[in-house]
Image (cartoon, rainbow, N blue to C red):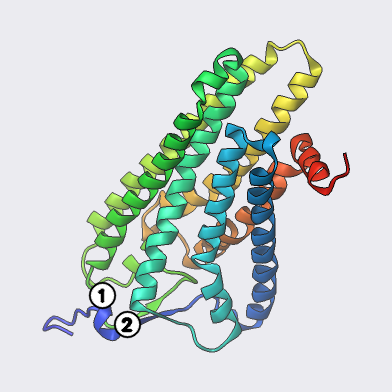
Amino acid sequence: MNDDGKVNASSEGYFVLVGFSNWPHLEVVIFVVVLIFYLMTLIGNLFIIILSYLDSHLHTPMYFFLSNLSFLDLCYTTSSIPQLLVNLWGPEKTISYAGCMIQLYFVLALGTTECVLLVVMSYDRYAAVCRPLHYTVLMHPRFCHLLAMASWVSGFTNSALHSSFTFWVPLCGHRQVDHFFCEVPALLRLSCVDTHANELTLMITSSIFVLIPLILILTSYGAIVRAVLRMQSTTGLQKVFGTCGAHLMAVSLFFIPAMCIYLQPPSGNSQDQGKFIALFYTVVTPSLNPLIYTLRNKDVRGAVKRLMGWE
């Protein structure tokens, strides 16, 4: 500790993740619910990745990006959920300084990557519906790989900026993070100096990686709706609405909670409310994505039948 009472967390060696300690009677229930959703996430997303790889009919841009999303969701949940399960099960709620720093970096990197990847997926749907004759040229495999790589690089670069800014902030003695994982707003609350610069940086980059992607997605789907309404084929209408409706549902489940958390200052929302919102987008949303994208999906059903030798 230095002369003015500021403390460097790395010298203390660990943080305490308060999590849901205020509701000890709920911890067992939350543990069971989180474990079920985590297993659903692992099984559902691995299913999509393996099926997309094994079935040549699914070697299309849409399923390439969907496999990326599934892999992303697997990494995203694994960066925070195992630690949450350990903390919910036992009395120990600690995480090492290095563990907290790594967790913060990956949660932020993967969350940002998902924002950008969902834009890329909406562009793919736009090209498929609005520019069908040019689709194979527009969504060339090399271009698809570049778009996917750009999503990952932008997410990890943005996270490097925030993680370094957050861990330079001096803390005030106590090491209790009032959250179930290490995230920027919760860590900024531990600071004993003015964090307005950090909060402003967070809001600006959140606007870039949350609001702008959301606007681009809605613009893409506005164009898709206009194109669909001009279609004469009822079957075509149903197919387009089925695919695009699934994507829009996934977008809503991800972006609405993210906006509630990151588009206001850390002091601007109830921390308890923030925990449950974060629990939703880190646990529930990744487990629902495989169901949303595969339910009533003829391509996936056909791929499963071919894999099982049923046709």
The front one of 310 and 84 is 310
The front one of 294 and 20 is 294
Task: Report the disc number at residue 131.
Answer: none
Q: CA distance from mark 2 to mark 1?
A: 8 Å
Q: Amino acid at mark 1?
A: Leu
**Above or below: residue 246 compared with residue 14:** above
The front one of 255 and 119 is 119
Disc 2 + disc 1, Cβ < 8 Å: yes
Mark 1 residue crowding within 10 angstroms, few (<14) / some (14–19) / many (20+): many
Task: Report the disc number at residue 174.
Answer: 2
For the C terminus, give its image quadrant. top right
The front one of 180 and 244 is 244
**Above or below: residue 82 compared with residue 143:** below
What residue sits 49% from the left and 35% below the top?
119
Give residue 120's position: percent from left, percent from top.
Answer: 49, 34
Give residue 69's position: percent from left, percent from top.
Answer: 56, 47
Q: Which residue is mark 1?
A: 171
What residue sits 45% from the left and 54% below the top?
110
Task: Report whether residue 186 is seen.
Answer: no
Give SS at disc 1: loop
Q: Is residue 202 left or right of residue 170?
A: right
Tally of numbered discs: 2
Give residue 199's position: percent from left, percent from top.
Answer: 30, 55
Q: Is residue 214 left or right of residue 99?
A: right
- Quarter of the view holding residue 59: top right
**Above or below: residue 10 compared with residue 246:** below
Q: Amino acid at mark 2?
A: His
**Above or below: residue 177 compared with residue 129:** below
What residue sits 63% from the left and 58% below the top?
284
